[in-house]
Image (cartoon, rainbow, N blue to C red):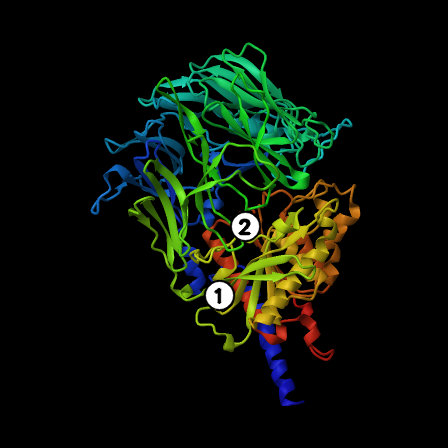
Amino acid sequence: MSRNSLLMYALIAISLLLFFSSNAMSNSYQLPSQALQDVVEQTKNVSTRLSRDKQWLAILTPRKHLSIETLAQNELKLAGLRASPEQLIPSRIKYSYLSVELINLSQLTADAKPITIPLPSGMQMTNVSFSPNSQYLSYMGLTEQGADLFIYDLVKQQSHKLNSTKLNATLGLKYIWKNDSKGVFTNLATPVFTAKEQVAIAPYISETYGKKAPRRTYQDLLKTPQDEAEFAALTTSQLAFISLNGDVQPIGGPAINISYSLSPNDKYLVVNRIAAPFSYMVKYYDFAQSVELFSHTGDKLKTLAQLESSEYRPPGSDSVRQGPRMIHWRSDKPDTLAFVQALDKGDSRIKVAYRDQLLQLKAPFNQKPVPLTKTPWRISKIEWGEQDTALITERQSDKKQMRVSLLDTSPSSDQQLSTWYQKAIRDTYNAPGSLYRQNAKLNGKHLGRVFKLYNNQLLHYGLGASPQGYQPFLKSSPLASIEGEQNIAKPSTLWLSSKEQLERVKYIVKLEPLTLIISRQSPDTPSHLVMLEVESGNEQLLYQNSHQLEAYQGMTRQLVNFKRDDGLPLSGVLYLPAGYRAEDGPLPVLMWAYPREFKNAEVASQVNYSPNQYNQISTKGPVAYTAKGFAIFDKVAMPIVGEGNNKPNDSFRRQLVANASAAIDTLVEMGVADRERIAIGGHSYGAFMVANLLAHSDLFAAGIARSGAYNRTLTPFGFQHEKRNFWEAPSLYQQMSPFTHADKIDEPLLLMHGEMDSNSGTYPMQSARLFKAIRGLGGQARLVTFPYESHSYKAKESIMHMLWEQENWLERYLKSPTLARGSAHFSPSQPDKSKVTFH
């Protein structure tokens, strides 16, 4: 036997030993290399709040990551709700904060120090807001006992707990201030019975009577009468008003209060209450509801509407349940309700001249609702403004179009809509951004927030996406109807970001002189907050993020533009390790992407990028692996385009492979990559993409797929933006399912999934079944299931282990030439590594 053969056998033996050794270690949480640990430990970006009088800026420092012990605490999973029965709060809270610092913008001096609100040990805060009169800061304090409501007096610099009875925040950590700032409305706990004692053991029976209910595959749904009883016990609460001195005024009786809103004059409340019978097909927010009207003293005035369960909503992107929807208070009026009514029975498949009608109902609510306007497309948003104006947003999802129109609601109006702009839903180049809002006033009293008219023009600010990158702006646009599409009528630019830095409007502090709070960042400087007087250029630093990761200093980033074989322009962001030079030759590459559907090729080719953006390293993305010597091609465009009568998914596989092939060709031509050492990764629908690319191409050496769905017959009533059900397009579902083609997945695939994934369609079973298929067919895969995790992984231990898994996978299959391409690199006389499996 030759020396080269002996060397090859030795390498193979060592590789297999490493495989099995790491498999033995994988029964416990592992830590990645130090650079990746530092990414997990870095300080997160702060959040901010601005008081309504523009005098106080709150800086909120978020918590980093939960511990696995926190996720492992007792929780009930009912009707799409995950809650702690002991704490009566959601068991998985997305945003909470460790501290709040207050900056007095009216007393900015060089030596001024922010005020820190002290918190008891072990408490975190959430839902932080200023009172309408800007005299108090309120927040919910979270402890092991549950949630309490706190008020911080900005003058006295003191906090006190407002509630004496425990809160019930299972349906959301919510409260609302009374507009006169004399107290808040929130849900209080009621005596809880033991649900198991209320329900007898009996068979579980479901029936259907020929009425279509085409719903997607949701998880954590109710399944039994026992579940129903537990859900009712967990979520029943007493809506109440709590004054600043702690007095409590109940609003009606105990009920399942899913939402509530207060009229701008503080006299009335609209309360949405879940009504029995509960559905076993949809999540709690789609249950049948009663919409009740109460006085501020707690008396019920009337039932405004009875809404049926959304399980019977017709299929289609723009279909809605019948009955009034989007019931809300006009923010520019003291006590006027507005709502939308479908004119097509909620079924977007029906051809009609008008789909929706906007109506209003004034106090004392004993007259017929008054129509305001009709729309040919489905209404998705209503914004109220000064001078009896409103902006109505309509969507036509099949054509991926949206339109925003001005409506004059004054009594003399002809109710005709005047188009402000129309664009493709995903068109970022022509997006006007956010509207400037202030409180409306009537007879000296504040009402709700309305968009501000400045010299009869709208003020709006946004990212300013363009082929050259982001250049954020503040603009004013006349309220004039336009002809054609995709252009706002003659906007004037009031402020524009520097071309050397990425600056974004956070808040408009004053209009005259124009004063802004902006966030500013550059490639080597993290985001910081600055108060800027535009005309004079005077500015003052308010807050500076200090986190920088040593291992990533010198990493380079560039936007790479390229074309698909059919000429469609594509792009991606290329990261190269610090110190890399072209003469160093090709690097192993990790490509990361997420497919998106378009009806317009021009929109599909748009780029969203800024060369001035700080290199923030996220644990969720791939960029952290530049510290390990990998080139990263991130946010690689994966458009799936279906123009005209063609539907995007009809050519999903072909377009997916064409996108990936063009990206690889570009990297190889640049000298950054060689074709034998490129991996593809993605999360959720990106994981679905990964498995499809491995099944239908030989472009990649390995794949990483997190929290994906791989068998579309298990999501038979649609997925992502595909609205055809399985029985309407069975061949499409089979063709797009990588599970159906598992025999063609001949590259190693790392599958990861949260054990308690609650996302629609991405059951943990999806990864388990694909893994078993690959194992049964003799392929290479590793399945990692994270205990207590959902669709995205939250526990610090899980994130560390996820990074370790990915790091080891990339090291094995991109840096080991003998392992990079499966058994094709072995002669028949050599060991067949495709038989190596992980459990």
Tell me if residue 43 can be seen: no
- Compare marks 1 and 2 and give the one earlier in the sequence: 1
Mark drawn on residue 787 = 2
Of circles 1 and 2, the one toward us is 1
Task: Name the spot of residue 386 as percent of width and height, x first.
Answer: 45, 26
Tell me which amino acid carries mark 2.
Answer: Pro
Answer with the quarter of the image where residue 400 lies. top right
Q: Is residue 34 left or right of residue 819?
A: left
User: Residue sitting at 46 percent across and 61 percent down?
Assistant: 31
Answer with the quarter of the image where residue 777 lies. bottom right
Quarter occupied by the C terminus: bottom right
- Residue that badge 1 annotates: 626
Q: Secondary structure at mark 1?
A: helix
Q: Give the answer, above or below, for where 635 lies relative to 240.
A: below
Q: Give the answer, above or below, for where 721 lies relative to 412.
A: below
Tell me if residue 12 can be seen: yes
Q: Is residue 683 left or right of residue 319?
A: left
User: Residue sitting at 54 percent across and 76 percent down?
Assistant: 585
Using the image as rendered, state which of residue 617 and residue 257 is in the foreground.
617
Task: Name the spot of residue 323 as percent of width and height, x first.
Answer: 64, 22
User: Residue sitting at 60 percent across and 71 percent down?
Assistant: 669
Answer with the quarter of the image where residue 179 lies. top left
Q: Give the answer, above or below, for where 830 lies relative to 505.
A: below
Tell me which amino acid carries mark 1.
Answer: Thr
Q: Is residue 99 left or right of residue 272?
A: left
Report the label total.
Answer: 2
Q: Give the answer, above or below, for where 7 lies relative to 246.
A: below
Q: Residue furthest left?
A: 111
